[in-house]
Amino acid sequence: MTATVADRPATGTQATAPARHRRSGRSTLLTVAMLLCLVYFLLPIFWLVVASTKANEDLFSSFGLWFSHMNLAENLHNVFTFQNGVFIHWMINSLVYAVVSGLGASSLATAAGYAFAKYKFPGGDAMFTLVLGAVMIPMTALAIPTYLLFAGANLTNTPWAVILPSLVSPFGVYLMRVYAADAVPDSLIEAARVDGAGEMRIFFQIVLRLLVPGSITVLLFALVASWNNYFLPLIMLNSPELFPLPVGLAQWQAASAAGSGSQALFSTVITGSLVSILPLMAAFLFLQRYWQSGLGTGAVKA
């Protein structure tokens, strides 16, 4: 007795149709969720771009999420010429603070993370536990003790008062420790030792190339944190020529909101904020190429 077509088990496309439908439903939901996240993150930037094209009076009389008056050129002129071009000095200060702090924090975190991952020494686990504990402490909680420490060393109102605290990155050390544990094979280190390479040569000529993507990630985190740092420079610095961009723009905003005949600087502050994020965007676009490069560089001996 032969089985009919209806009695035969479904195979091929018919068997996988429900699973494909479920996958399609999940992918649609994830796509919608990602689009909502994209709108959530990009909407403030879009508003900043739109608001930078408006004069002070247009900011309060027109729809905030669309262009109505193109006043961008005049706003940019006001940003770079107000108070004898102090905005340029603030941008240079922010650039110096961010680059020096970012490179220093990335270098120290890379070396410390590699040491925690690949070396066994007395007290290593306890020290790494302290690093994890430091990740839990917000930087604002350490601002006042840091100020008292630097005041005792006569380093307040100097660039070092902003740079030195930014060199310490507990999260960067934790990230590099986790990354180095998997990115650097123990067999590679042992092979280099057998060939007669010292520990410093192993680190700088072999290991460092493997840790480039993780190090660049820490560098970007440190750049963003230092560039956007507001509270620490606010309490450490009292000379306007040493201010970074966040503190300087906050002063302009305070002057705008003061009233009593104060000059309205709302469009200037908004346009200055737009200009201030451009270096960070450029840094991300330039450094993202190094996230995937260097993963296998140095792992194969010629």
Image (spheres, rainbow, N blue to C red):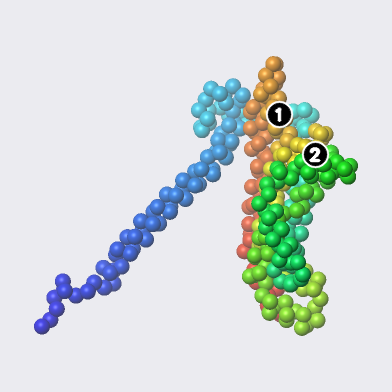
Q: Is residue 157 above or below residue 165?
A: above
Q: Mark 1: which secondary structure?
A: helix
Q: Quadrant of the C terminus?
A: bottom right
User: Looking at this view, is 14 or 154 the one in front?
Assistant: 154
Position of residue 139 measured from the top left corner of the image (x, y, whole percent): 70, 46
Query: Label 1 belongs to which residue?
Result: 252
Circle 2 packing at 10 Å, graded few (<14), some (14-19), many (20+), is many
Q: Which mark is residue 215?
A: none
Name the spot of residue 236 as percent of width and height, x first.
Answer: 80, 39
Q: Which residue is mark 2?
A: 236
Name which residue lies at 68% across and 64% down. Answer: 177
| Residue at far top of view | 260
Q: Confirm or deny contact between disc 2 and disc 1 (CB under 8 A).
A: no
Residue 78 appears in the figure: no
The quarter of the picture where residue 262 lies is top right
For the point 78% across and 43% down, which residue is it? 145
Of the residues under marks 2 and 1, which one precedes in the sequence?
Answer: 2
- Residue extending farthest to the right is 154
- x, y percent for residue 202: 77, 73
Q: Is residue 235 left or right of residue 273?
A: right
Residue located at (46% from left, 48% from top): 35
Q: Is residue 14 left or right of residue 40?
A: left
Q: Amino acid at mark 2?
A: Met
Quadrant in which residue 252 is drawn: top right
Question: Is residue 16 shown to the viewer in this render?
Answer: yes
In the figure, 166 relative to 114: above or below?
A: above
Quadrant, the N terminus: bottom left
Q: Amino acid at mark 1?
A: Trp
